[in-house]
Image (tube, grey):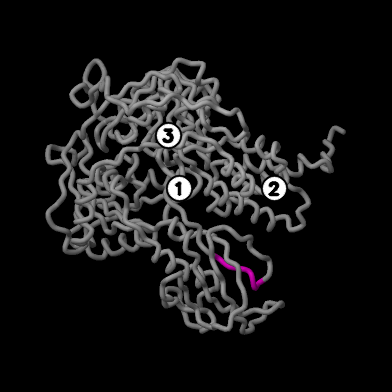
Amino acid sequence: ADDVVVAPPGGHNTDNHKNVAGAAPRERAPPPTTSGGLADLQRPELLYPRARLRRRKIIYHGGPTNSGKTHWALEALKAAESGVYAGPLRLLAVEIYERLNRGGTYCSLFTGQERREVPHARHAACTIEMVPVGASFDVAVVDEIQLIGSTDRGHAWTRALFGLDAREVHVCGSRDAATLVEELCARAGDEFELRAYDRLTPLSVEPKPLASLAQIRKGDCVVTFSKDDIHRARRDIEKARPGLRCGVVYGQLPPETRSQQARLFNDESPNGYDVLVASDAIGMGLNLNIRRVVFRSTEKFSAQQFAAQPVTLTVTEEEDDDGDVVETTTTAVATVGTTPRGSSSSSRGLAVAASGESSDRADDDDDDDVVATTTPSDDASASISSPGGAAAAAPRNPATEEDDPSTGGPLTKKETTNALLRGARAKCLAPVEPTLVKQIAGRAGRKNTRFGDERGGGVTALSAKDLAFVRRALDAPNVEQRRAGLFPPSEMLAAFAASRGLTQASVPEVAAAFAAECEMDGALYFPSGYHELVQVAEKLTAQLARDDPGGAAKVPLADMLIFCTAPCNVNDRHALAMLASYARARAVASSPMSVVPPTSSS
């Protein structure tokens, strides 16, 4: 959510936002004709007939961070008889939920992780994947609309934009997607209005990087893109500046903890935090009293690079069938969730699921399970290598009986494998995108805070190289979003599978078959979400196989598709186990041999 600005009497901050009428859109082509087939996505707006029956007005609030754009959208939401807010992160949904309830507007919360239903509430805050397209509202707010062009999650914004049944739909974000959204509105028959905003306070880049962490001062937010490095930076700062207290914010923290850390950083009393160390989770939303953003790094883990380059692990196992220690060496080839884990000791292994900051499916910088298969090897070393790269020195290995210096005891196989994979992740780094740099840097000097005066906010880095990168990113022109992500509803996939005789096929096989036959307007849309669907399906299938080795109850394909598109963080072992238990219960209930246990009355 964007920053709170004081509204002048009578409504909008007319000095900062302006209605943009008659902006020259790109030349519109007539809507394509549809074949009516079960793989036809030429007119995705027609998948939502309820929204098409309503005369909707789409209001695009476009501007940079700290321009007040989301504030005005939320004002319309609060004034409505009923409404819904949809954002990209649980963190944002929780923040809006708390803000509306504090202001006297009863609001419920719906995310893939939790539900908080407030009695008599006619408003709701949710993550973008949880948008209830089947419900009717007076006003809807869709935040960070520029993510409609995301290769991973863009389809969720397309679904919300086309499917929300609301009189007014306020979309907020940078102006990069304004032309695209206007074109989509024309296709759907909706009225479109663009309101453009400018930043409320200045933002300046410091001429020199910091010489050391000793120059960190109160009100700084140090940004890095690894959970481990966040905690390392906090310790380093508190060591270099003993008088400063540091808070941390990153995606894996529970929403309540993140909110508490943010409140303590905003707290000006002696009990509050002086410095914040955070990931890119602060780039979207979080109203924080930041004086200056300090980039500790400008590179971030790339899930695409990791998935594209399988890594080879060599790990020594030391147990026989009875659990006694023997000397057996195995090699594991780790890939991102593509091979079911075996049950024998020779096929056990851990690897890492690449994840970026998202709403419900994954959290940033978290080393979670990835599948590793193992085959015998004569190499007794513990090393890791990726294609085209030399093997990196491995951490201490239990086979050598060397101790972990942090614990004073030998590393377990799990600890060793995770350490090896962290080394592999470290090789798969990519520069942070300029748009993300702008979002993060823009959090400094927020208006109506102790640092939001005429001097505005500052941006710097810990190295000259990173500072030069930040300066180039802030000066780079925004890239216009030209196409929207698109993904079929689970019901459409199920109907397609039934028509092609694929009801006994796996979800990845159905997705591949649909993608091969799918028809869509390539000038306006691109496929989005297929990789995530396949990854979730493989993790859920592997979990079901572990829980029920005999496969007594098979989950019907239509149900499996629903479970695989559910907004559940499958990188969380507990959440994955719970999702599998629901799927297993559904399988038993739909089995022709299932028996309903008698009730006490019978």
Residue 413 coordinates in the image, percent (x, y) = 55, 73
The magenta span reads: 345-350
Sequence order check, earlier mark of 2 and 3: 2
Residue 316 coordinates in the image, percent (x, y) = 56, 79
Residue type for callout 1: Pro
Nearer the observer: mark 1 or 2; the answer is 2
Q: Secondary structure at mark 2?
A: loop
Residue 157 coordinates in the image, percent (x, y) = 44, 34
* Labelled disc at residue 319: none
Q: Residue at point 18% right, 44% down? A: 457
- Residue 272 visible in image: no
Residue type for callout 3: Leu
Vertical arrangement, residue 340 with respect to residue 583, above or below? below
Q: Residue at point 15% right, 37% down? A: 453
Residue type for callout 2: Ala
Which residue is disc 3 drawn over? 524
Q: Work out which quarter of the rendered image holds the C terminus and state it.
A: top right
* Labelled disc at residue 505: 2
Residue 96 or 16: which is nearer the viewer?
16
Which residue is disc 1 drawn over? 254
